[in-house]
């Protein structure tokens, strides 16, 4: 159990640090047709065949699960690549064990490390799937996954893949938004002069091939091209198309933090014609669940957001005994009454499911959390007469 006195001491410093952040805009969870969210990240590979997966990888997956976006895209280097086929396959199993905890669909744009290890291409087909480039639709948007490391074509998109890409763009040109994902960045932050001789960490092998793609994406009004490969965050616009490098899942950084070398993932919100991308650093979102095994009538969770903006979480799941429930939330400590901290807080039940054994109920909850104040969210059995401690204007005066 968490004691109120302990929480007051634990979060006092956080309150002071985040006081200046509270005027930041919120990013609410979208709702309705043409409104959804997806996450993009890349490069969770270990530092070498014998090195463990970075601790940031499962941490980010747990945070993304709390957001519960509609889709998740990985921009490559899912594994480091082994010295033997057995070692490579083990790396895939380890990474898949983490990624499979996501409660939403996951799509991988393969990187060079997927194919560099022993047995790489065959194991990729076995563990991920037979296609290394493909596309899909979701609501008003079209998503294209490409392979910048085709056999014999590292650093290129050409041949059959280029023909397929042109046809796919033409077929889907009426879509409201088009998003593209591949591993090697067309505009490499660490090699802006496109020096393929001095730059050992090759991104695109051909300026002409890069420029052909840039013209193609501009022609079809692609919204954003997401890449990885260089372990950092960077973004720039060319011919009206945004090019974003996102490789912050935990592979060794290639730049200091002030130049983009920090752990991160991207939360992209689509609301009709509007697209908003938010860069999120891990370890600023905390959750601690209690009595949440489905055997209690009032499970609860403590949530804390130490970002400088409110966050909307659609994936907070509380499991309880069968019954009719409402959801309540309150600041911690419950005596905290500042409107400044708590004015944007809310909680609502999005989905209710009875588990297959019929012995428990699972409720998925949307929680809007302001920065800097821990909140307690719990289920209340409506038939019990316990109305809980709902947030109201009188509580936040």
Image (spheres, helix red, strand yellow):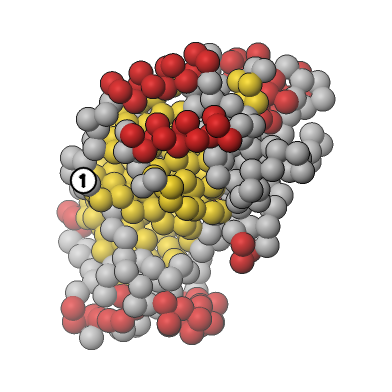
Q: Is residue 374 shown to the viewer in this render?
A: no
Q: Where residue 12 sits in the image (x, y, percent)? A: 50, 83
SS at mark 1 in the image:
loop
Q: Where residue 73 sits in the image (x, y, percent)? A: 46, 37
The foreground one among 348 and 372 is 372
Q: Where residue 92 sits in the image (x, y, percent)? A: 65, 27
For image coordinates 39% across by 68% down, the residue present is 309
The foreground one among 15 and 146 is 146
Q: Is residue 7 shown to the viewer in this render?
A: yes
Quadrant for residue 96, please give it: top right
Quadrant for residue 319, please give it: top left
Quadrant for residue 89, please give it: top right
* Residue denoted by label 1: 272
For image coordinates 52% across by 15% down, the residue present is 159
Q: Is residue 150 left or right of residue 103?
A: right
The foreground one among 276 and 7 is 276
For image coordinates 77% across by 43% down, the residue present is 198
């Amino acid at each position: 159990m968490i004691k109120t006195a302990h929480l007051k001491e634990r979060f006092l410093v956080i309150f002071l640090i985040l006081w200046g952040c509270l005027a930041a805009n919120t990013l609410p969870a979208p709702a309705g047709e043409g409104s959804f969210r997806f996450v993009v990240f890349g490069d969770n590979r270990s530092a070498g065949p014998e090195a463990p997966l970075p601790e940031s990888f499962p941490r980010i997956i747990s945070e993304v699960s709390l957001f519960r976006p509609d889709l998740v895209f990985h921009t490559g280097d899912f594994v480091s690549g082994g010295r033997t086929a057995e070692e490579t396959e083990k790396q895939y199993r380890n990474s898949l064990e983490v990624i499979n905890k996501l409660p939403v669909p996951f799509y991988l744009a393969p990187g060079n490390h997927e194919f560099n290890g022993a047995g790489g291409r065959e194991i990729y087909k076995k563990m991920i799937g037979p296609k290394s480039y493909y596309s899909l639709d979701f609501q008003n948007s079209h998503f294209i996954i490409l392979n910048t490391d085709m056999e014999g074509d590292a650093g290129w998109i050409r041949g059959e893949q280029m023909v397929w890409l042109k046809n796919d763009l033409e077929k889907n040109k009426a879509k409201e938004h088009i998003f593209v994902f591949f591993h090697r960045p067309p505009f490499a932050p660490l090699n802006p002069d496109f020096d393929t001789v001095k730059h050992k960490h090759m991104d695109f092998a051909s300026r002409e091939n890069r420029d052909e793609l840039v013209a193609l994406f501009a022609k079809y009004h692609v919204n954003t091209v997401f890449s990885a490969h260089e372990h950092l965050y960077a973004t720039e616009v060319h011919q009206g198309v945004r090019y974003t490098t996102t490789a912050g899942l935990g592979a060794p950084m290639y730049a200091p933090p002030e130049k983009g070398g920090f752990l991160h993932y991207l939360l992209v919100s689509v609301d009709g014609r509007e697209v908003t991308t938010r860069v999120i650093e891990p370890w600023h979102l905390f959750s601690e669940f209690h009595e949440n095994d489905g055997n209690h009538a009032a499970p609860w969770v403590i949530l804390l957001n130490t970002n400088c903006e409110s966050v909307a979480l659609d994936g907070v799941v509380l499991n309880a005994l069968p019954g009719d429930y409402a959801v309540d939330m309150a600041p911690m400590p419950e005596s905290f009454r500042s409107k400044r901290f708590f004015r944007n807080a809310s909680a609502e039940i999005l989905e209710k499911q009875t588990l297959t054994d019929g012995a428990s109920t699972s409720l998925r909850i949307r929680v809007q959390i302001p920065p800097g104040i821990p909140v307690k969210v719990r289920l209340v059995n409506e038939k019990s007469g316990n109305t809980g401690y709902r947030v109201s204007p009188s509580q936040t005066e």
